[in-house]
Amino acid sequence: MNIFGKDTNIEVSVSNNLIRIYGQVQNIADYALIREKIVEMISNNFRDIKIVFEESNAVTSSIIGFLLKVTQKDKINIHVVAKNEDLYLLFEILGLIDIFKVTKSE
């Protein structure tokens, strides 16, 4: 998919309040796609959203900033599953484990 003139590196599947992300999250197009899906869920009155990063070993700062805004300002409960150890460690280093309820598995 091409967003902002860039191709996305990810595939996203959505089912109810679950977002499953496949591939490496790397650029603004990936952020835009993830943000779009979360905004759709919020507009459909989901207050608890689970995001599963199946493979990615990192996320962009824009995704982290958006997730912080969603949890802190919009009062949406976010649960992140970071299946890659490096991604889990990133959330841990940034002090986001409790805020996003990050786990390593579903």
Image: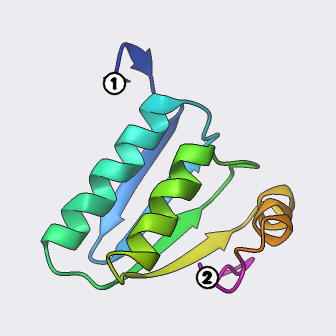
- In x, y percent, where is residue 41? 24, 68
Q: Quadrant of residue 69?
A: bottom left
Mark 1 is surrounded, within 10 Å at the Cα level, by few (under 14), some (14 to 19) or many (20 or more) other residues, namely few
Question: For the residue marked with disc 2, what is the amino acid?
Answer: Ile
Give the secondary structure at mark 1.
Answer: strand
What residue is rendered at 33% in x and 24% in y? 3
Q: Which residue: 70% across, 79% down?
A: 105
- Closest to the observer, 22 or 97: 97
Label 2 or label 1, whichever lies nearer to me, is 2
Within-10-Å neighbours for mark 2: few <14, some 14–19, many 20+: some
* Count of marks overlaid on the render: 2
Q: Under tag 2, what secondary structure?
A: loop
The correct choice, above or below, for 70 with respect to 55 in the image is: below
Residues in magenta, as a range: 97-106
Mark carried by residue 99: 2
Find residue 18 and report its image quarter. bottom left
Image coordinates for residue 47, horizontal then vertical, percent: 29, 85
Residue that sits furthest to the left in the current view: 44
For the C terminus, the quadrant is bottom right
Closest to the observer, 7 or 27: 27
How far apart are the two marked residues, 2 and 1, measured between alpha carbons? Answer: 29 Å
Marking on residue 3: 1
Which mark sits nearer the N-terminus, 2 or 1? 1
The x, y position of residue 2, in whole percent, is 34, 20
